[in-house]
Image (cartoon, coloured by chain):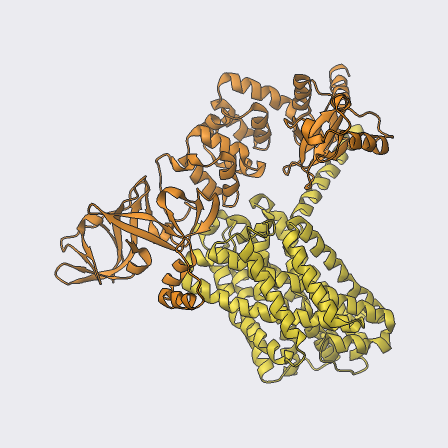
Chain colours: A orange, B yellow
Amino acid sequence: MIYFSQILKKKVFTEDEIEVGQLDDLVFLTETTPVITKILVKTKTGRILIPIDFLIKINHHIYIRKNYEETTLSENELYILRNLLDKQIIDISGSKIVRVNDVVLQKEKNQWYVMGVDVGILGILRRLGLSNLGEKILGILKWRLSSQFLSWGEIQPLELSRGEVRLKKEEKKLKKLRPEDLADYLEQTSLANIQKVLRLLDEKMAAKVIADLNINYQIGLFRRMLPKKAATILELIDSDEVVDILFFLSKKRRQEILNFLSSEKRKEVNYLLNFHQTGKIGDFLSLEFLATYSSKTAYEVKIQIKKETADFYSLNYVYVINENKQLIGVFSLHELLLQDDTNFVYKFMNQNLITVYLTTPIEIALRKMIKYKLSALPVIDQDKKILGIVTFDDLSENLYERIFK
Amino acid sequence: MIYQKISMKEFLNKLKWRFLFFLSVLGPGIITAVADNDAGGVATYTVAAAMYGMASQFLVIPETFILAVTQEIGARIAVVTKKGLGDLIRERYGVSISLLIFLLYFITNQGVVLQNVSGLKAAFQLFNVNWQLFLILTCFFLIVFVIFFDYKKLQRVFLIMILFYLSYIFSAILAKPNWLEAARESFIWPQKINVFDLTFWFSRIAVLGTTITAWGQFFVHSYIIDKKLDVRHLKYERLEVYLGAFLTNFFSWMMAVAVTYTLFVHGIKVTDGYTAALAIKPFAGETAFLFFAIGLFAASILGLTIVPLATAYVFAEIFGYEGSLDASFSKGKLFYGFFIIQILIGLLITLFPQTSLFKLTLYVDFLNGAILPLIFYFLVKFSEDEEIMGKYVTSGFSRFLVRGSAIVISVLVILTFFGKILGLT
């Protein structure tokens, strides 16, 4: 086992002691066993890529065969220095983002491969050539640092945007992550990178991840994607969400994508889109709603209703929010009346929420109300914070006017 | 008629949404820029204004412009790449250079923190309270707030602190200034002093040097990322950064007015914000004095929170640790740790009255001057790199503008330092 930092910049010689240059980088295959395939040598005239087959040994110097040939980068290959070292990676088992401080290489059956990465402080000290000194100092302080090692199976490079990296193979590792989590990580990177990572996923997973992304990213992605590819992904996402995304694209772009949708989906989406231009929920937002906390009892809620809703025109539902004002539940007055006074809200509230956004077309809101037999829906923002409600009365009035006047 | 009405309504609606969208990006640019007027800034402005009157704000318009341009680069890189300046330096230049920059940066910021703790001490002394006790309490509460508040709540606190800067406007008005003359001296050409006096220029550059800082460049960057803005917000974020640049110089101009028409016209020289506030009292009255003290208090608090945060952000970026105001204490231990350490060091040094702050300020300015050109080099380099910036790369005329601003500031900041060494300011 050796550290990449220990061999970087080592001099490269041919077997007959002729200096070629110094080691500038290593290339590895991004597969289950990430085998080192090529070495990049910086010579006086430029950088050359040499297949690993010509490598004889790594000692004080690096020796290669004298009849070495040059080659180029192929698909599924990444550089260690340029693509992995110092970059951010996803620690899959720990489910967090960390930075690579060093890369660990291992030789097995005459093949070199990337064993994993060091994300600890020792990695940094080693890079600075201070690992001995560092360990001594820490030894005096009786403080032992262990290398924080993550094996290749536990990590996923987060950034694939640098250089001409082309990866084709579907990544099994990413499948271990929950789509919601992956969406969260990806939101911390640029759009171009999100695109690259999504390309590694199969369509089903990609659709799930996209559905979990923030609407801004969704729009950005579908603006850039090929219409055909966009259609295959949208096919897997709920129609009303598809409409939300498509609505923000240009008319031309929208039409291009629609052409690739299956006829059934297209019909549905077109139908919803027709209504989308006519009105938005925002126009019907009502602030006449009651929000409470899940830690209250049924009795306390009843008192709250008496105190706070005296001047309400009507009240059908009580919404439950958490400390961040995010909507987490709902119950109807009927459900409330059925409870014992001492029962807690979190025990009987309904957590399966039907919600709409400010940008949701009123037709979709109405459809939801009819489908789930609800007389009002909460309107939330991207943060799940409740902004207000829309009532069936208000929406149907608008519809009536449009049909009969 | 009806049609017209509808289109008017639509227009207003559009305007309303644009405004709301603008509010949603509000924060990074304004907070960073206004915090540049921290305790150290207040001291420099006051000393310069007492010496040279409104001429100390001469060329303030191009200065605002340059500040806007340099802050915009950072904002743009942040919005496009979603990476902090620390992240980019580490990824592009490796471990040793990042570590070196972080060490320099840490020490510089420590000095700035120290300036702000002593600014706070001065404010408490002006309020005539037990400064030791209040200093310790304030630092304690600051730490608690930063740890337990999330991004949104803290931002609200910051924005409220900025409202306190309005007190400088009141103290300026109470000084009964000649506005026309003030505008002429600062916007057109100073007539009250000899413009060809070299020492005047050193003092003028020092004023600029305190406005444009190393930590400001890092902070606007990290703070935008923590706010989770993206490319769609870029247009509005730019506007916000420009607004911030305007505000910061607007406040410092008001500060200069307050000092000019009380101290400068009577020929009274001061050495810092504390003596300035006391000296203003006999000319502009108790209220003006109080407003001035409140301004100093707000400036110190803002600086004392934001500068250590700027350190913590960069540490987290360079070494790959959790670094967000939204993180819990247990998750962001090292992030909050760096924040706390900087405040505690500043507090401890200030509690021992025998430390010479004047010397320390000199070293801080030196380090700031040394590190700024480096940061601008990185900023320009990253913003012109197509691989990093894609279609948002700096090109054409703005390339000239960005490089020009960076070079002008770097040169001026270095000049400031030599001015201080030679005792010209």
Q: Would you say A268 lies left or right of A113 here? A: right
What quarter of the picture does the C terminus of chain B occupy? bottom right
| Residue at the far top in the pictured view | A404
On the image, the x and y values in percent for residue A242 come to 56, 27
Inspect this view and state whether residue B177 appears: no
Vertical side of B222 occupied by A33: above or below: above
Query: Where is residue B271, by image quadrant?
Result: bottom right
Inspect this view and state whether residue A107 appears: yes
What residue is drawn where x is 14% and y is 56%? Answer: A66
Residue closest to the eye, B396 or A358: A358
Residue closest to the eye, B236 or A118: A118
| Residue at the far bottom in the pictured view | B422
Residue closest to the eye, A305 or A246: A305
Q: Would you say A372 lies left or right of B171 here? A: left
What residue is drawn where x is 76% and y is 29%? Answer: A342
On the image, the x and y values in percent for residue B148 come to 65, 52
On the image, the x and y values in percent for residue A20 come to 20, 60
Query: Where is residue A228, by image quadrant?
Result: top left
Vertical side of B344 occupied by A194: above or below: above
